[in-house]
Amino acid sequence: MAARAENFRCTACGASRSKWSGRCDACGAWNTVVEEAPLSAGPARKSLGTRRGSRVELSDLASEEKPPARTISGIGELDRVLGGGLVPASAVLVGGDPGIGKSTLLLQATAQFAGAGLKAVYVSGEEARAQVRMRARRLGLEQAPVQLAAETNLRDILTTLEKERPDLVVIDSIQTMWADSVESAPGSVAQVRAAAHELTGFAKRRGISVVLVGHVTKEGQIAGPRVIEHMVDTVLYFEGERGHQFRILRAVKNRFGPADEIGVFEMTGRGLTEVRNPSALFLSERDTPAAGTAVFAGIEGTRPLLVEFQALVAPTPMSQPRRSVVGWDGARLSMILAVLEARCAIPFSGLDVYLNVAGGLKISEPAADLAVAAALLSAREDIALPADTVVFGEISLSGALRTVAQTESRLKEARKLGFNKAIAPDRGSTGPSWGPRVRQMPDLVTFVGEIFGAG
Ligand SMILES: Nc1ncnc2c1ncn2[C@@H]1O[C@H](COP(=O)(O)OP(=O)(O)OP(=O)(O)O)[C@@H](O)[C@H]1O
Ligand SMILES: [Mg+2]
Ligand SMILES: [Zn+2]
């Protein structure tokens, strides 16, 4: 019997497999594995055989060419996330949950790029022309020199672009595009990949920058943006919590700039506005210090950012206590709880633990460990941390505190926002003379003893 064809595929990560399962074992997503139509008739894939190819030109690494000039949109939060503006002939993927504001962001960005001199085309596959125009009017952009198309047929779109030769084209969204060379339905992994491949290849050949919008899908038949991340130069995700007006644009991959850079926006009736000083935004009202909170002096990308961790610790009626985390890694929380128990003899068994990052931000820096521990201890002991204090430092399994990068930027941001004290692991210095007074902690036991009088 021939090897079974792998005709089931995960729509979240694109992994293929020979049988269906409820959970993808490549990416862990639920209900994302679907059966795909087998590749259409035709000979099975042949090896390249013995026919000779033509010779490929080889060259030195050195080049006289200058890096191509980037275009600045003037939306500072966007330009920074792109690595300093839009690179010509680059392919950018903007992923995000349905309704988060992708079309709004991209219509505003397109209008700005058009204003900066780029010939720009916006292709909507999701909304009728009238709908896009209504949004443009609401955003005050109806006079922007942007050319609009409402189309899903990729062949027609490419033909049009070939004639028009724009500098920038936005495709909203890649999941609505339909390449007639592929038999599967629009939105399937095969269609989304084929359309992205065609568009990025075309863009590179013609020197056009292409921005692809991709909906993050939780389950079902529609392929998510992850299946095309490898094809593009830059991957941005647009994130935000339901019920919060703040939106974060995060670079998760960038061939032309640092990844992990974030841009912060606020969604208003007139569209997205930039938040130039996000630290102020992510701190809740802090007139009186509250138990269960700690302000973390973090770094997101190249920018320092103060964020507040909030913890609640309460006795549980359950045999298995709850561990609920929003905006931070659940496994990392377990590790910190284990270290507190093993090294400081502070158990959390029998206690429910809730941990949140205020403002809907997601933090992934290990430098936040000490702030997390501070919030947890403060909640457990019902003792507020000293006012005007920021906290940072990585916790190792031994309970030692590790120095983290960019201490000075963290302290500068803290000072800028009126924090006069810092708790940090740095053993080398007491901090710069201009900055907050730094209390140095060599390990977690010392921290617990000095700040909470326990341990
Ligand atoms: N009239 C309005 N006033 C204020 N905010 C609005 C208005 N209309 C839409 N919005 C905001 O814009 C959001 C939708 O934005 P947008 O259509 O850009 O999102 P999207 O990510 O493109 O969504 P989709 O998944 O439908 O493509 C809404 O959730 C809402 O917050
Ligand atoms: Mg949209
Ligand atoms: Zn998967």
Image (tube, helix red, strand yellow):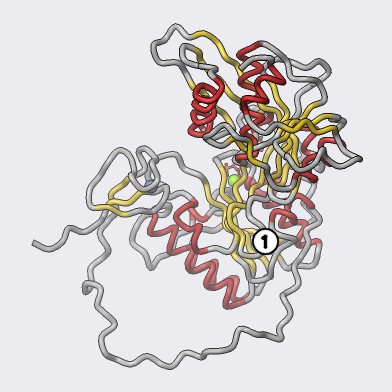
- Classify 60 as above or below 250: below
Quadrant occupied by the N terminus: bottom left
Disc 1 secondary structure class: loop
Q: Amino acid at mark 1?
A: Gly
Q: Nearer the viewer, residue 427 or 332?
A: 427
- Asked if residue 92 lies left or right of residue 38, the reply is right
Tell me which corner region of the image, top left, top right, bottom left or bottom right, holds residue 150: bottom right
Which image quadrant shows ligand 1?
top right
Tell me which corner region of the image, top left, top right, bottom left or bottom right, holds residue 253: bottom right
Looking at the image, the residue that sits furthest to the top is: 317
- Classify 243 as above or below 162: above
Count of labels shown?
1
Estimate the x, y position of residue 236 in percent, counting from the top left: 61, 52
Residue at x-position 90% and y-position 40%: 433
Estimate the x, y position of residue 275 in percent, counting from the top left: 79, 41
Is residue 72 visible in the rendered structure shown here? yes
- Asked if residue 30 lies left or right of residue 338, the reply is left
Mark 1 neighbour class, 10 Å CA radius: few under 14, some 14 to 19, many 20 or more: some
Estimate the x, y position of residue 412 in percent, counting from the top left: 84, 41
Estimate the x, y position of residue 344 in percent, counting from the top left: 56, 22
Which residue, given by chain and number where applicable, does mark 1 sit on? 257
Tell me which corner region of the image, top left, top right, bottom left or bottom right, holds residue 415: top right
Is residue 171 visible in the rendered structure shown here? no
Quadrant occupied by the C terminus: top right
